[in-house]
Image (tube, rainbow, N blue to C red):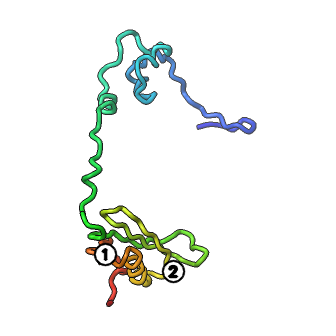
Amino acid sequence: MGSVIGCMFRLDCQSIADTAAITGDVWHQWLGHVNQQTLIPMNTDKGDGLSFCDPCVQGKLARRSYDLTGDIRTTPRLELVHSDVCTMETESLAESKYFVTFIDDFAGSTAVNLIKKKSEVLDKSKEYQARVGGERIGALRSDRGGEYMSQE
């Protein structure tokens, strides 16, 4: 495998005796699909040129851009609000362990609130509704976590 010489580790590798036997296509793939002009100074090509490379063709194809207007599914504000509760790796200075997000599907506006217990989600959702002008939230979409199941 190898040996330590001083403070260096030397690998016992077999060299490729005849690099001329390796085709330009193999070098093309080994070097991350470089073009033929890059391979010429290395004398890896014998003038035959590179053969057809499907990954190179796929990489050069034009992709259709995303239709940004198709992302919005709702028309009035607050018809659909996405919400989730996430755990933080590190507790905040106020000893909050979680945060809850509210994202309006139409406007894309986001509100993030820090909470100490998951039971505070209902209070934060009421605060969010008051903060956006008291308008009624049409639907609240979540991952159906238990923190959204309240008797109120």
Vertically, is 98 above or below 73? below
Q: Nearer the viewer, residue 55 or 8?
A: 55
Which labelled disc corresponds to residue 87? none
Q: Answer few, some or many: residues within 10 Å of disc 1's Cα (few below 14, many 20 plus, some between 14 and 19).
A: few
| Amino acid, disc 1 | Arg
Quarter of the C terminus within the rendering: bottom left
Task: Determine which residue is flagged by label 1.
Answer: 144
Q: In this rendering, would 64 be left or right of 114? A: left
Q: Nearer the viewer, residue 29 or 5?
A: 29
Q: Nearer the viewer, residue 60 or 152?
A: 152
Q: Position of residue 2 (x, y in %)?
A: 62, 37
**Which residue is most to the right?**
6
Quarter of the N terminus within the rendering: top right
Task: Determine which residue is flagged by label 2.
Answer: 116
Q: Identify the image quadrant of residue 76.
A: bottom left
Q: Nearer the viewer, residue 43 or 21?
A: 43
> Which residue is found at the position 40% from the left and 24% from the top?
26
SS at mark 2?
loop
Q: Position of residue 100 (x, y in %)?
A: 43, 73
Marks 2 and 1: CB-CB under 8 Å? Answer: no
Vertically, is 25 above or below 125? above
SS at mark 1?
loop
| Amino acid, disc 2 | Lys
